[in-house]
């Protein structure tokens, strides 16, 4: 008789482009987000947790800043009524839906923050995942740039709160309206040509002043040797754009003067310059100097997407990259004003401004600076010398936990004591406790300082070894105190 | 000429069965989960955040406790390689996948906790959502029931930590092996008949002793008048099952004695009784008396699903239900031992035990008891009397925030002062601050105690009104101190 076919075993694998987070990876992020939420809360922002799933209709068919269809999201069709549902790809599209849905019940202006995972149906790459965290704060319904200034101030406070000291970050502010003014002053009214100029400006970060000059003109050879066609402006025509991008001066006043010159007689340009002036004045009044927040027209990220002020937070300290070269850490947050948030739902234009923090990048920065206050230390491990006395060992961990000390009893097969110490090692335990029959009879326990023990084993001479014991016998009644002493000596 | 067709506006709606969470709903849950994580951490459990998306292959085709196909999940097919992906429907299936995938790197036993949303593709109903939070702790790879006892102790500590006082909860422990022993003692070896008995026992909560007796026998008329066929056992045959269900006595010893009698000579039954005895002894040694955790063979939820000890946490205080009748709050957490967690991946049986807390139910319980420490108080609102002096108002909120006080400046159109106070009202602001031109000239500010004001407006007589002013004029330099005084008087 033929054997019944066996179903092959399923593969135990995370789907491609997804990953799992373990222990400290989870708690360090949670602690950072909790600190950020504290600052946002103090600024009067309210938490919002929208559903992870949206109708494709509400989400819109395009990601905000990419010319990409619906394929960028994970979507499926409902059985019941054929509605298409999708996982949110950011926290702004859901905010638009929520605000349109509940606008009569929400305060106006509505300050809200949101933090949570978003999903992108994209080709995964190294360090690029299809699920990642975002952390946003937005003010909806406030037309005044005081709202933008507030977001910048809050961003500065947030970075300091999580552990980036003053001097190690800089928030740079620009304004899309000023650029519009420059284009107007140039007489550039053709939408397609304006879009070309915007796209070119977006490359300023990469190709610099000379590169932009070439790309605005005839074109340029890029690094790969390919020739990139230019926008076709004359040198003279391109000049105001470059004047705008390089108008940053030593003082905000001087920068504003340069910008005023660049926009010539454009009304929208003058409005943009005035907005920047107001933002600078409001921030100065609250004590945020240019060591923390400054006007910088060379900030171009997102200038095509936003409609007014644009801001970006950069970490200015150096790290060593994967090739061992020093480089600046770079951007960890960005945002700006976008005034058509809910228009697609209601037909009404509603002003909004907000910021998004790159959660993973900020966490990486804190780790690079050794600023993560990790509560990830392993537990004290109470070993099991006599499996019939499990109650004794459980009572020990109970005592330790009641004293606020992370502790656990070994719950594997206790037969092989070496396995218990290996387990403690894998758990990064600072301390192991041993109470065999003899210790029990004498009313004592053995306390092993595992970290000191490992240090001694690695580097000590025989004399040092003898002088610095890493195992202590103490009366059972003094167990908690001795453990606390060992843990305390290292914190 | 025909008008170009307009695309209809998208509907601003949460998908059916999904919901959004606002303000305190988000922060109260986050605070509760953070307290729970603290206890889990102290017990040596490590955080795990697995990806929300799994391959359908890894997830398995069935929900754990329901005979339901794949339709219970939200699933879609990858474009690239036709892999089916799905949103996780619980936190146990991902744990199985993670443990199988990383078992060589993880400590054994592996204690892990996880908290986060899960998704069910089910018909939504009142209070039933298709996305909700779970909060689980499991120990994988520990065959000893000391692991089960530990979970019970941790659950008790957790409930007290979040604000359920001792006496208001009870954790009840049962054991599937004892039931198996009873079935063996009855000579019930037919699998189908055993399954029938299990299904019947599962109804004990609803139909009680008499109902189970009828259902084990010939059958019974249910509340709707329909006749439910019974399992067909004789009264004599059914007796041991009922003896088991009703074996709870005044003391653990007596309960264990009753259970011993119920399982007769069954080896597996005796093993189950011994496990319960061990659990009771371990808990007693740590000071968990029967006022917190007790043996109770009438706990039947999940008895069909689990393989060893089963536990359930119940809140014992009364609440008033939607019809105004008092009733017990009921279950908020449950769990037990399930020993084939990773077998489908690796072929190896790995013992596991764990608990899942009903996050929404526990939060509802805390709210019902007034135990939620809400940080959800509205911000102090600094009103805008003169829009040219925004910098002054921003400086005020800055001062308040630096003093740790939640504060914001009004960012809507300041023209209509009434709107500003309406806004403060909608924000549940405790205090509004007013500084018009006259105040500015005199170096003072007006501070309105909005909560006291509302109370007075509602209930005070004219005399009281005069005696208890709710608006104070103080020097500008004393603004923070006065606000603090007002806020402090209410906390």
Image: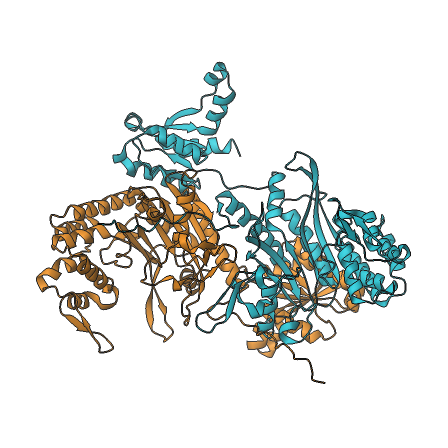
Chain colours: A orange, B cyan
Comparing A448 with A347, the one in front is A347
Quarter of the image where one finds residue B303 = bottom right
**Number of disc labels:** 0
> Is residue A154 left or right of B318 when viewed as pictured?
left
Q: Is residue B191 above or below residue A463?
A: above
Q: Position of residue A466 (x, y in %)?
A: 63, 74
Q: Quadrant of residue B230?
A: bottom right
Residue located at (17% from left, 56% from top) = A244
Q: Using residue A54 as the reference point, say whether residue B204 is left or right of it.
A: right
- Tell which residue pokes out farthest to the bottom in this image: A1
Residue at position x 66%, y 33% in the image = B324
Q: Where, quadrant-wise, is the C terminus of chain A in this rendering?
A: bottom right
Q: Residue sitting at 65 percent across and 51 percent down? A: B158
Q: Give percent across and percent down for residue A387.
A: 77, 68
A468 or B215: which is nearer to us?
B215
Quadrant (top left/top right/bottom left/bottom right) for the N terminus of chain A: bottom right
């Amino acid at each position: 008789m033929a054997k019944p076919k066996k179903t092959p075993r399923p593969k135990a694998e995370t789907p491609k482009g997804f990953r799992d987070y373990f222990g400290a990876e989870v708690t360090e992020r949670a602690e950072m987000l909790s600190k950020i939420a504290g600052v946002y809360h103090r600024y009067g922002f309210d938490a919002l947790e929208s559903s992870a799933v949206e109708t494709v209709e509400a989400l819109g068919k395009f990601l905000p800043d990419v010319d990409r269809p619906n394929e960028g999201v994970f979507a499926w069709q409902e059985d019941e009524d054929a509605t298409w549902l999708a996982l949110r790809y950011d926290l702004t599209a859901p905010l638009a839906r929520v605000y349109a849905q509940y606008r009569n019940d929400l305060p106006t202006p509505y300050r809200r923050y949101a933090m949570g995972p978003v999903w992108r149906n994209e080709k995964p790459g190294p360090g690029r995942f299809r699920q990642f965290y975002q952390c946003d704060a937005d003010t909806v319904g406030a037309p005044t740039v005081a709202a933008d200034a507030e977001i910048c101030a809050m961003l500065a406070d947030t970075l300091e709160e999580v552990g980036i000291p003053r001097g190690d970050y800089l928030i740079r502010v620009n304004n899309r309206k000023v650029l519009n003014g420059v284009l107007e002053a140039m007489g550039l009214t053709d939408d397609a040509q304006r879009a070309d100029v915007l796209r070119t400006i977006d490359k300023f970060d990469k190709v610099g002043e000379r590169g932009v000059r070439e790309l605005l003109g005839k074109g340029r050879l890029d690094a790969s040797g390919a020739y990139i066609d230019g926008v076709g402006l004359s040198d003279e025509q391109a000049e105001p754009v470059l004047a705008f991008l390089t108008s940053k001066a030593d003082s905000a006043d001087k920068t504003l003067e340069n910008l005023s010159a660049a926009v010539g007689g454009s009304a929208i340009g003058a409005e943009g310059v005035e907005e920047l002036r107001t933002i600078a004045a409001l921030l100065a009044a609250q004590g945020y100097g240019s060591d923390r927040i400054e006007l910088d027209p060379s900030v171009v990220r997102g200038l095509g997407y936003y409609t007014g002020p644009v801001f970006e937070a950069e970490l200015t300290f150096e790290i060593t990259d994967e090739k061992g070269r020093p480089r600046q850490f770079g951007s960890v947050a960005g945002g700006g004003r976008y005034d058509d948030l809910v228009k697609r739902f209601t037909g009404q234009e509603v002003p909004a401004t907000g910021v998004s923090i790159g959660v993973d990048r900020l966490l990486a920065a804190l780790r690079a600076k050794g600023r993560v206050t990790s509560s990830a230390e392993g537990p004290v491990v109470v070993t099991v010398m006599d499996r019939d006395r499990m109650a004794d060992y459980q009572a020990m961990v109970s005592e330790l936990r009641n004293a606020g000390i992370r502790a656990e009893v070994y719950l594997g097969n206790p037969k092989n004591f070496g396995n218990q110490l290996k387990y403690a090692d894998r758990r990064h335990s600072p301390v192991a406790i041993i109470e065999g029959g003899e210790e029990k009879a004498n009313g004592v326990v053995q306390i092993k300082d595992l970290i000191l023990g490992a240090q001694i084993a690695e580097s000590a001479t025989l004399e040092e070894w003898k002088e610095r014991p890493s195992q202590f016998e103490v009366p059972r009644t003094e167990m908690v105190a001795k453990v606390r002493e060992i843990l305390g000596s290292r914190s």
